[in-house]
Amino acid sequence: MALKMFSFAPTPGQSKADLHADLTAAALALTDGEPDAVANMANVAALLWEFLPDLNWAGFYRMVAGELVLGPFIGKPACIRIPLGQGVCGTAARTAQTQLVADVHAFPGHIACDAASRSELVVPVLRDGTVIAVIDLDSPSPARFDDDDARGIETLAQAIATRI
Ligand code: SME
């Protein structure tokens, strides 16, 4: 088995479209042929952290027996279980719709895992039409995420859906 060091990194000054394309390509390369879901989510969380500036939390919640359970992430320790429909993550999971929240204080029921969080992007990961996980990104900056980020992370979610 080849043991190797990975060096995936964003290119300074690249467009956001290129950044997201490179992020998804890196995620596909890192998870290629690896069947372990935890390993793959851990590496994708690390890539999200590496590629996307101005985050204070990046990672996964997995759908387990009808609720969201914390998965691999980078950031402060977070709440472990989130019922469907609660918070930004639970809303994304219940509706199967991306949640782009410019101001978390204005989102009814937002769950504050890190008091520094000001904006949040949560993208459901669907396999065969069913939500199996969500990707959660938090930023200490208000309105950190836009529609391009949402589409970019949706593309990533689709790309890795069979590998997590
Ligand atoms: N803010 C999320 C909870 C998860 S933490 O941000 C990591 C929510 O409202 O669902």
Image (tube, rainbow, N blue to C red):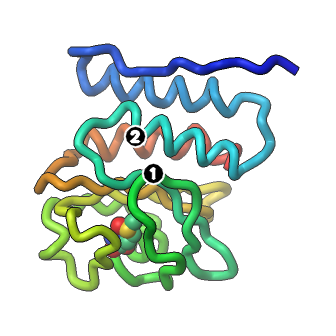
Q: What is the quadrant of residue 136 in the picture?
A: bottom left
Q: Position of residue 108 (x, y in %)?
A: 22, 83
The residue lying at 67 percent from left, 50 percent from top is 164
Q: Give the x, y percent position of residue 135.
A: 46, 55
Q: Nearer the viewer, residue 48 or 67?
A: 48
Q: Residue at x 66, y 74 (%)?
A: 64
Q: Mark 2 — residue?
A: 49
Image spot of residue 74 (x, y percent): 45, 51
The answer to whether the residue labelled 1 contacts the one labelled 2, judged by CB atoms less than 8 Å apart, is yes
Mark 1 vs mark 2, CA separation in Å:
7 Å
Q: Is residue 16 above or below residue 159?
A: above
In terms of image quarters, where does ligand 1 lie? bottom left
Label 1 neighbourhood size at 10 Å, few (<14), some (14-19), many (20+)? Answer: some
Secondary structure category for the residue under label 2: helix
Which residue: 40% across, 33% down? 50
Question: Which residue is under mark 1?
Answer: 74
- As drawn, is 137 to the left or to the right of 81? left
Q: Is residue 88 in sight in this rendering?
A: no
Task: Give how far across and how far down residue 40 sits, in percent.
Answer: 66, 43
Q: Is residue 55 above or below residue 66?
A: above
Q: Residues within 10 Å of mark 2 (few under 14, many from 20)?
A: many
Looking at the rendered structure, the kind of residue marked 1 is Ile
